[in-house]
Amino acid sequence: MIAGSAAATTVTGVSAGTARAAVPASPGVTYTNSIAEQRADPHIWKHTDGYYYFTATVPAYDRIVLRRATTIQGLASAAETTIWTRHATGEMGAHIWAPEIHFIDGKWYVYFAAGATNDVWKIRPYVLECAAANPITGAWTEKGRIALPLDTFSLDATTFVVNGSRYLCWAQNDPAVGSGTNLYLARLSNPWTITGTPVRISTPTASWETIGHRVNEGPAVIQRNGKVFMTFSASATDANYCMGLLTASASANLLNASSWAKTANPVFASNAATSQYGPGHNSFTVSEDGRSDVLVYHDRGYKDISGDPLNDPNRRTRVQKLYWKADGTPDFGIPVADGPTPVRLSSYNFPDRFIRHWEYRARIEAGVSPLADSQFRVVTGLAGSGTVSLESANFPGSYLRHKNFEVWVEKDDGTAQFRGDASFTARAGLADSAGVSYESYNYPGRYIRHYDYLLGVQALSTATDRADATFYTQ
């Protein structure tokens, strides 16, 4: 902690009490999970027509479904249409997996993997095309199999554009490399045809990539700050399933394997505290206002699976906000608990500092790691009466509460005292109505505020006090 009083600090040369922080570029967004039960490998495309389009693997592995809504949450209750069904014989007759929907040059395309009726493990990538404005009601035609130089087990094709060039990335087995799947990249000459020689950009070698099976699969791309970030999923599709990250410069030769750097550890993994297991096969979308990146993924709500995980139908689609570190890299945090997704609360007068818990004491701090220490779910107040409580994201069942007028994160002990101490009335921000201030339920007139960067519940009298008690949701 930096020494010194918040009241004595200046912000950009102006008294902290009178400084007006900029409203965050990426304000808080909240969704309620899960979005879709028994829907794995989810892909959401936000289109220019105002709709989100959603497709995913169904447990029967026999068809491709599509739904749309004007909000991400709305996808949960949106009608679902089957746009394509597996063939009765031959190719595309089994294991219909991991569809993705993309809009390319004025037409819709779905990429998916499929086996054959006479060999269900002869899995290869295929493409469908639709020229209609509405892909749910429009006619789909088969563009056929994506021809790859190596005719082996291959799946999870995704496409993206960097500097005007469109690429295809997919997972494939190469017997010369060994068992399992690697990630390959090639340019596309049209949405269903690669051109040139594919390059292998990732091979499962780390311990977290090789549990149960040697797996790199399910690539997904997000671009920011001149970088291309490619997530992928690793290990068997049980609780060991997790996500890694490849990073390349957008100006580099992406078809050079050395342009890609892999994280040493998973960036997203099972979390027992939040009861989320095997998160992976993700995609990315953006919030309704276009100002927040949203991580889309599947997982299960339990750890132990009987039999082959592929026969367990209960992978479900989930979403949560994707955050970005000060160095421009993504921070995935943890798969959050079921129900409303959490927010972060940044200080009005120290905009790079967020409310976080450290050894259970609440403070404001910059560069919080792990991210979940600074994430809280805004839930119905434990004391009721129109109040809210702030539940820790990584310690579900623990809440911000005041004790001797200091703010701590503590587990709900079920007492009326705790319920009162952990309940607040959310007010328009006292220093900026676009923000929020939290008034104590059982000590009206006292608000959560920071002083020397530590949080307390205090009465306010000055402009600086009110600034110290104002926060933005992010």
Image (spheres, rainbow, N blue to C red):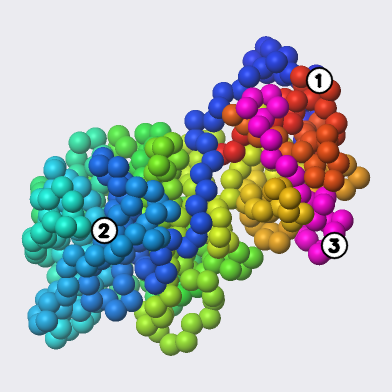
**Which of the pair 312/140 is nearer the observer?**
140
On the rendered image, what quadrant is the C terminus found in? top right
Q: CA distance from mark 3 to mark 1?
A: 34 Å
In this picture, residue 209 sits left or right of residue 252: right
Q: Which residue is mark 3?
A: 415
In the image, the segment drawn in magenta is 410-433
Q: Residues within 10 Å of mark 3 (few under 14, many from 20)?
A: few
Residues packed near mark 1 inside 10 Å, few (<14), some (14 to 19) or many (20 plus): few
The secondary structure type at the circle numbered 3 is: loop
Count residues near mark 2 (Cα–Cα under 10 Å), then give few for <14, some for 14-19, many for 20+: many
Q: How many marks?
A: 3
Left or right of 60, for residue 358: right
Residue identified by numbered label 1: 462
Whether residues under marks 2 and 1 lie with C-beta atoms below 8 angstroms apart, the answer is: no
Q: CA distance from mark 3 to mark 2?
A: 49 Å
Taking the magenta stretch, the answer to whether it contains residue 85 is no
* Outermost right residue: 404
Residue 387 image offset from top left, x and y in percent: 71, 48
Above or below, 418 against 468 in this view is below
Task: Measuring from the top left, give residue 29's x and y in whole percent.
Answer: 51, 44
Query: Is 417 part of what is drawn in magenta?
Result: yes
**Marked residue nearer the N-terminal end (3 or 1):** 3
Q: Amino acid at mark 3?
A: Thr
**In the displayed structure, does residue 434 sit left or right of residue 133?**
right
The residue under the point 40% across, 60% down is 76
Q: Is residue 472 visible?
A: yes
User: Can you name the residue that lies furthest to the top here?
Assistant: 13
Element at label 1: loop
Disc ID at residue 100: 2
